[in-house]
Image (spheres, coloured by chain):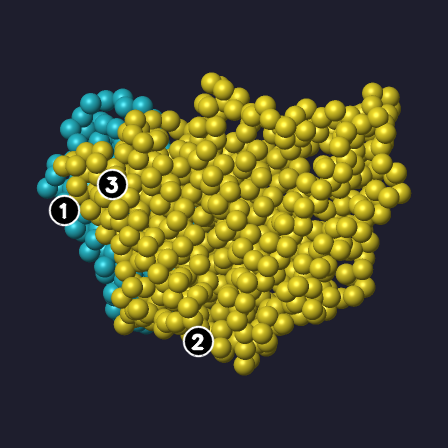
Chain colours: A yellow, B cyan
Amino acid sequence: MEQLISTIPALPIVSAILTQLLSVRLGRRVAWLSVTATSITFALTVVILALHLAGVAGDPVSTSHDWGVLLNDPLSAIMGVLIVGISLIVHLYSVRYMAEEPGYARFFVLLDLMTAALLVMVSAGDLVTLIVAWHVIGVLLYFLLGHDMRRQSPFRYAFWTLFTYRIGDVALIVAAAILYHAYDTWSLTEMFSRIQTSPEVPGFMGMTALEAAAVFLALAAFARSAQFFLHNWLPYTMDGPTPVSALMHAGIVNAGGFLINRFAPVFVNAGDVLHVLFIVGLVTAVAGSVLMLTQNDIKKSLGYSTMGQMGFMIMECGVGAFSLAIYHLIAHGLFKGTLFLGAGGVINAARRDDGVPKDDLYTFVIERRPARRRPPWLMMAVITLVVPAVVLGLAHWLVSQEFFQKQGAMVLLFFGWVTGAQLIFATYRMRTEHTGRLFTLVLSSFAVVVVGYTLIAHAFELFLYPDAAFRDQMHTASSFNVVWFDIIVILTTIVIVLGWLFTYYAEQNGKRANRLRGRAWLIFYALISREFYLADIYAWLSRALLRTAKSLNIWLRWA
Amino acid sequence: MSYVMLAVGGLFLPLFPLSMLFNLLYARLRNPVLRATVLLAWPQIGLTIIFASGITVPGWLHTWAVLTSLLYGLRALVLREVSLWTSFVGTSAWALLWILYGNGASPVQMQLFSLGISAPLVMMAFLIAGLERRFGAAYLGLYGGLAHSLPRFTGVLVIVVLAVIATPMFPTFFAMLSMIIKSLPTTPVVAVGIGIVWLLWSWAGARLLQGLITGPQQLAVADLGQANTWLYVVVLAGLMLSGVYWMGTLP
């Protein structure tokens, strides 16, 4: 077992070295060496996951040093399958996609090294190994994004990524230093067991060591997962090769969620830091979604979509649903990877043939024929409000009868209810000829998604966090004060209802909107289309810093 | 006496404004072997002096060392002359050795860290000589496109720059890690300052690479020979291994 765990990250490294050394002799065929190694690595990760599912637990693998320890736990097993699975698809896709590009062998070398670094990151069993892998990923991503060295622009945007990632690296190092000084060990397993016995070690500025460490860990996660204020690099990295975009959006940017899960024992003992995660995640989810809707460039739109999803992932951690965040990052990774890799092919195919079947379902869903009469609004209002609540409630009750006791579950239920209600409301407004058929389709889809999501999320929770006491601790730690909880729920409800009313009013009045509101709308649109002016502010700050450096050099005579 | 020794130490483990003397001297050197010797020997002399005199480092000196390091890290951002870039980043790195000294690092550990910091700078000095021989100057934005005209040279240059800016698993990485870990409990502001210096180095390194290796191919010149490439690879691999096995020892 120990050899197997060490072999998994070692294989891509060996493949990278061989690919580089044999690239002249084998030419373009060298890519298949890399693909083969990744396929074997994938098979090994699947074996490890299967062993975990079968209940065969392994020991951590260690070297003679204090660091270099690899963990063999459910989290590393499941993340390993995701990473190598996506990497394998990206490898296969790149064999032909990158064939015309210069630096073909270099691309596969970097892909292999990235796979190895990601595997080491998810299985790191000590702080130093984690820092090393975390740091190396940023550097490798910089060179992957800037693969086309004939042009300056990919490098410029890759640098934004590198710099933001380096902010996260420094934050992670500071967090590691705090944890090391507080618990006198580099080993994560040892540290987590010490945290459970003495969580109140003093730290800095009135915070406990765990609170201080959690703040810096959160910052590291925010930088990696493009949370608001640290998100600007994400939509601008589309100048890199498409396979790199797929790998980045599917397997790298979601590392923030992994980090929070890995340090779950720190976060559950870190006071209000989980609430900060919730708020930052919420703001990011809203900002990312709004920015996504206003883009006219499909790739930038996908970038902001990822930002919104990462916001949801961090928000889930904030409400104590750590395992749900892992499920979310896996699901998002798979669908976003598919979108990136499939986008080019779909566009090409659509140019030849729209591919839309002229069948009954198409005419029903797309070519809607408005009904002459609407169903009674009272009945629809009841359905809109009650049905999502019933579906969500039943699905959660199926997996856990005490879910009403968990505030985090209630928050997620609330958001689920809002989404469901909005879906039914939108369906009602479609005014289709066959209302019954459309509602049956929509409601059964909603029920399948909710029940599936709930069951899988529950299975993930049991797999990743088998200790029931720790699961309870996670939910308790994320609970808000009841007054604050009520205030947040009421405020959110008001915002959502106002949003619905605003949309309804705007649609009813159409062009009759008054001039003042039109002006406010324009200002809002300018703010959104300029992406909250954050890129401008950062550009201004960096130019000011460079001007200062230049002036200093002149004053000090370049000495 | 101790202030005199501090000043002498501050010349060789450069503290601003004494650091200006080193940079003026380095700018006058043209021979790569001489440059390499200075880069290797300069901080070692400083370490020998401060260990021989056994001076105690006052608290304010930690802040001064970080400020010096920040100053040179910042100024390195806009440099286009690569040789000057090397000496500025070196100054920025060596100044931080005061923090290790102040936190009670052993002479052997400090000499190893200092060697680990100097070694990639020495390699830079030789690469710069290679650029000057080929193009007449080692200057950012002057020619660019090295990735296409000199692929082997570029590969080596990229890895050497990564070693200079403290990328894992090079000794510089472990030196920076050790400095942050050691200074955090007593002087958290200094630890954060070291983190910012690290950020500035990354920025400076990225600007250097962007100015040299990207862009369309400009000039047709001879690439680094295979033997020389292997020599660089072996030295870099040795540096990495030394980083892991000698300097990767944690506190």
For mark 1, give the secondary structure.
helix
> For the residues marked 3 and 2, what is the alpha-carbon distance in whole angstroms?
41 Å
> Which residue appears at 17% of the width and 41% of the height?
A22
**How many residues crowd around disc 2 within 10 Å: few (fewer than 14), some, or many (20 or more)?**
some
* Residue located farthest toward the left when viewing the structure as drawn: B227
In the rendering, at what x and y percent does residue A526 appear? 69, 28
Task: Check disc 1 and report the residue beneath it.
Answer: B231
Where residue A45 is drawn, which disc sits there? none
- Where, by quadrant of the figure, is residue A34 drawn? top left
- Where, by quadrant of the figure, is residue A507 drawn? top right
**A58 or A525, which lies in front?**
A58
- Observer-side mark, 3 or 2, equals 3
- Marks 3 and 2 belong to one chain: yes
**A464 or A135, which lies in front?**
A464
For mark 2, give the secondary structure.
helix
In the rendering, at what x and y percent does residue A259 appear? 50, 59
What's under tag 3, amino acid-wise? Trp
- Marks 1 and 2 belong to one chain: no
The chain ID associated with circle 1 is: B
> Which residue appears at 80% of the width and 27% of the height?
A371
In this view, A69 is above or below B198 = below
A407 sits left or right of A304 in the view: right
Task: Check disc 3 and report the residue beneath it.
Answer: A32
Task: Check disc 2 and report the residue beneath it.
Answer: A190
> For the residues marked 3 and 1, what is the alpha-carbon distance in whole angstroms?
29 Å
What's under tag 2, amino acid-wise? Glu
What's under tag 1, amino acid-wise? Leu
- Observer-side mark, 1 or 2, equals 2
